[in-house]
Image (cartoon, rainbow, N blue to C red):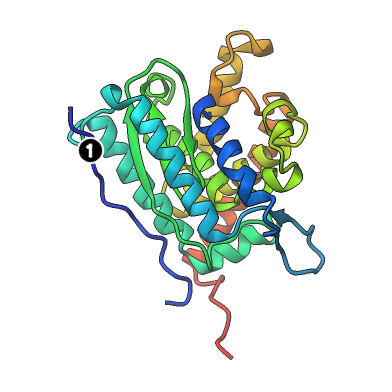
């Protein structure tokens, strides 16, 4: 079966579960990059400063190479472009990416997620669907994504599928892979130490519900989806890969409900013209 070649989607310029394969590949490829002295730092201010190990170009190249490895591994399981699941995922990605290009929304997110950066980065948004029972999805640095068919029986509707995809896309927009490499350039802690992951998952939860709201999906369904996942796998027994590093306790649900409230309020304010782009100097 020929591999589908979907068109890439760009985020407009503001002025104009991860399979083990890609994790290991990122560690190997990033070994030389992260030790080359490239450190990108956020501007100082009242927000937490975050270091990123990779330049925008390095991040993009890393994601491309990892994605080729994944598609080669699953070449016989990639669904053709005319399948309903593929069309749905690509529609959701396009809507979420358009939402991420809204400059007032970018400012709103960046207040609390300092490493959320779009300007200066090049994203090649692409999603393929892989026929596999695992309940998983992931988005690589640079915007290339895979969704496994095991997620579809769990996501009851488009809003719940958008929850998963927005969450994973948020990891790419917040440059979490680059941030984790900066914390430990050897990659050892990335594979073995999970203590930093919860912070990034919380950030992806927060970004994701905002993206959902501005993309026209109901972020309240995000709470429903993650709660269903939690209830279906109590105590981590038989935990899907997509939740392996995620906080799954009541505190996460409470935090998400607060994020949803804020996201819906921000969308209402934007629709009413109460959130406007900054004045040009």
Of residue 184 and residue 218, the one placed in the foreground of this image is 184
In the picture, measured across the screen, residue 70 lies left or right of residue 19, that is left
- Which quadrant of the view contains residue 28? top right
Q: In which image quadrant can residue 130 be found?
A: top left
Residue 257 drawn above or below residue 131? below
- Horizontally, residue 252 falls left or right of residue 10, namely right
Q: Quadrant of the N terminus?
A: top left
- The quadrant of the rendering that contains the C terminus is bottom right
Category of crowding for the residue at label 1, using alpha-carbon neighbours closer than 10 angstroms: few (below 14), some (14–19), many (at least 20): few
Q: Secondary structure at mark 1?
A: loop
- Number of numbered callouts drawn: 1
- Residue shown at the point (47%, 55%) measured from the top left: 214
Instruction: Please give the name of the residue rendered at 56% of the width and 71% of the height, measured from the top-left corner.
Output: 274
Outermost residue toward the bottom? 281
Residue 88 or residue 65, whichever sits in front: 65
Q: Position of residue 87 (x, y in %)?
A: 25, 38
Residue drawn at the location 37% of the way across and 60% of the way down: 10
Q: Position of residue 201 (x, y in %)?
A: 65, 37
- Residue for point 25% across, 45% down: 6
In-front residue for pair 46/197: 197
Residue 45 percent location from the top left of the image:
80, 69
According to the picture, the residue beneath numbered tag 1 turns out to be: 4
């Amino acid at each position: 079966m020929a591999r589908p070649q979907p068109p890439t989607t760009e985020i407009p310029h503001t002025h104009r579960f991860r399979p083990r394969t890609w994790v290991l590949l990122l560690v190997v490829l990033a070994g030389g990059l992260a030790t080359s002295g490239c450190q990108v730092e956020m501007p100082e201010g009242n927000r937490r400063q975050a270091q990123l190990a990779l330049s925008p170009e390095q991040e993009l190249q890393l994601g491309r190479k990892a994605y080729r490895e994944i598609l080669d591994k699953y070449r016989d399981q990639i669904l053709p472009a005319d399948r309903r699941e593929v069309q749905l995922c690509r529609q959701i990605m396009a809507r979420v990416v358009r939402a991420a290009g809204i400059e007032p929304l970018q400012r709103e997110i960046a207040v609390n997620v300092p490493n959320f950066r779009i300007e200066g980065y090049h994203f090649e948004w692409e999603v393929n669907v892989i026929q596999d029972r695992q309940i998983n999805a992931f988005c690589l640095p640079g915007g290339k994504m895979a969704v496994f068919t095991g997620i579809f029986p769990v996501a009851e509707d488009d809003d719940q599928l958008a929850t998963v995809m927005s969450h994973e896309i948020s990891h790419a927009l917040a440059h979490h892979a680059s941030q984790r490499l900066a914390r430990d350039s050897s990659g050892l802690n990335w594979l073995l130490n999970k203590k930093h992951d919860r912070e990034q998952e919380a950030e992806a939860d927060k970004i994701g519900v905002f993206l959902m709201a501005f993309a026209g999906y109901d972020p309240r369904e995000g709470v429903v989806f993650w709660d269903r996942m939690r209830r279906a796998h109590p105590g981590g027994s038989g935990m899907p890969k997509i939740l392996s590093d995620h906080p799954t306790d009541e505190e996460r649900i409470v935090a998400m409900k607060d994020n949803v409230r804020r996201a819906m309020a921000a969308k209402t304010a934007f629709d009413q013209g109460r959130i406007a782009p900054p004045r040009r100097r």
